[in-house]
Image: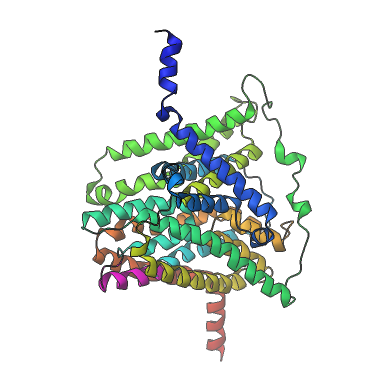
Amino acid sequence: MTILDVSLMTFDRPEAWQWLIQFCILATALLLGNVLRTNVPFLRKSLLPSALLGGLLLLIFKAFPACKELINKPMMEIVTYHALGLGFVALALKNNKIESKSTPMKVIETGALTASTYVIQGIVGLLVTIPFFIWGKKIFYSAGLLLPMGFGQGPGQALNFGKIFTGWASQQGLDFAGADFGLSIAAMGFIVGSLVGVIYMNILRRKGILSRKKIADAQRNKLEDYEGQNEIPDAESIDKLSVQICMVLFVYFLVYLFTNWIQGMDLGNFGTNTLKPMLWGFNFLLGTLFGIGFKWILNRFKRVRIMEREYINNYMLNRISGFCFDIMIVAGTAAISFKEFGKFVLPFIIIIVLGTIVTFFYVLAISKHLYPEYKYEGFFSMFGMLTGTASNGMILLREIDPKFETPAANNLVLQTLAAIVLGFPVLLLMGFAPQSLKATWITLAILVAFWIVLTVFMLRTKIFKRRKTELKE
């Protein structure tokens, strides 16, 4: 037997092709989704992401017995999980040189709007699932907290915490398909963000409040978008794109090493029961922090002349993150299983309807206060993000502000760090709430108090102005 024979015995096995076939399926679905969105007028006007359409196509194919086994659900979930983390790492590595039209306080207030919307979505979700659990155990009591993960965070976080909730439910003898529930909410979030946003935009246009603008100029890339100053060549001993990909993977590897190290530590009851199980779901947050740290080290190397060239290319990192998020949406949608869906279809519908209504009117009310000079631009950017992803917000914003002449786009980009800091308590509660019904009640009370604090902070000028007027009278 020759070496060639041994190689062929290895690579002619189905296992050698299994992962690659799954990625080929995802790529094919994404291309078909883009073809549909480009050529079907209704889909083009709906602003539904091509990635979501590709995922929905895979859901349809899964209904056919011949295609059911072709799409591997566990692999789709793994791709969703890692695509989220890698996408955030790529964004964190970018050198964000933004000529900001936003003041620091406006950025913090926008972050508070993001965090407070997560909170109120969590409150709405719990007010649905707790009664359903008490009146017949129709659904896991903490399942409502997956609303802000699906709407506000997207398929990656909906999957991560859905699996955590499934584990806690099984420990208590409850049957709950948390991953399917969370991913279903995330898929509906994209539809809500696109369709509801477009419908409201058309209503405003018919009333004459908004006017149509051409977006062709905003979609063209300028030369400086592709390459910054003093960057490494496109192709030398190593391709520039290879450098970007290797940096993203290196930082993500650091996330794994850190998380695995924490798992071996003794952190007490809270750390063992809450922090450790949840830490693997924080891959996107840890990726952001490690990415920022790695970028800081590279910039320090340049300042002290250890490194003379610029290795970070924002354009390529944008493309890497865009690819990761597109694949994440396709895989996350394709991973949805309707096998257990009938068990929670009624609470699911109620959560989606109430979550949509509350998110729409809350974000609209706060946007009118925070952004009086560009209230609709601010609303559409935030509503799209808080039901889908940041890209959904930017898509809606481009329809009425194609050249990003208002600070809305800058607010959306710069608020990320403030939202992470202000929203971190919500993520901690995600690990605490599913431990028991009592813990869920405590979580609900904390969320209500936290929402009041954040809302008062955003409306403080209006509240105190009214108070001063009353005192004068």
Can residue 375 be seen in this snapshot?
Answer: no
Decide: is 49 above or below 445: above
**Between 97 and 19, the one nearer to me in the picture:** 19
Left or right: where does residue 112 sit relative to residue 225? left
Q: Is residue 131 magenta?
A: yes
Q: Main secondary structure of the magenta part?
A: helix
Q: Which residues are magenta?
A: 124-138
Residue most extreme to the bottom: 473
Colour approach in the figure: rainbow
- The part of the image, by quadrant, that contains residue 429 is bottom left
Residue 10 pos. (x, y %): 41, 20
Q: Nearer the viewer, residue 163 or 86?
A: 163
Residue depicted at 40% across the width and 53% down the height: 337
Q: Residue at x 58, y 28 (%)?
A: 243
Expressed as whole percent of the image width and height from the top left, the position of residue 3 reads: 43, 9
Where residue 460 appears, as percent x and y from the top left, is: 53, 73
Can you say which quadrant of the picture contains the C terminus?
A: bottom right
Give the residue displayed 60% in from the left and 26% down from the top: 307
Question: Residue 404 appears at what percent x and percent y?
Answer: 71, 57
Do we see residue 455 in this rendering? yes
Name the residue nearer the viewer: 410 or 132: 132
Task: Please indicate whether residue 293 sits to the left or right of residue 267 in the image.
Answer: right
Q: Is residue 315 left or right of residue 139?
A: right
| Total numbered badges shown on the rendered structure | 0
Pick the residue in front: 19 or 64: 64
Residue at the spot 57% in from the left edge and 53% down from the top edge: 53
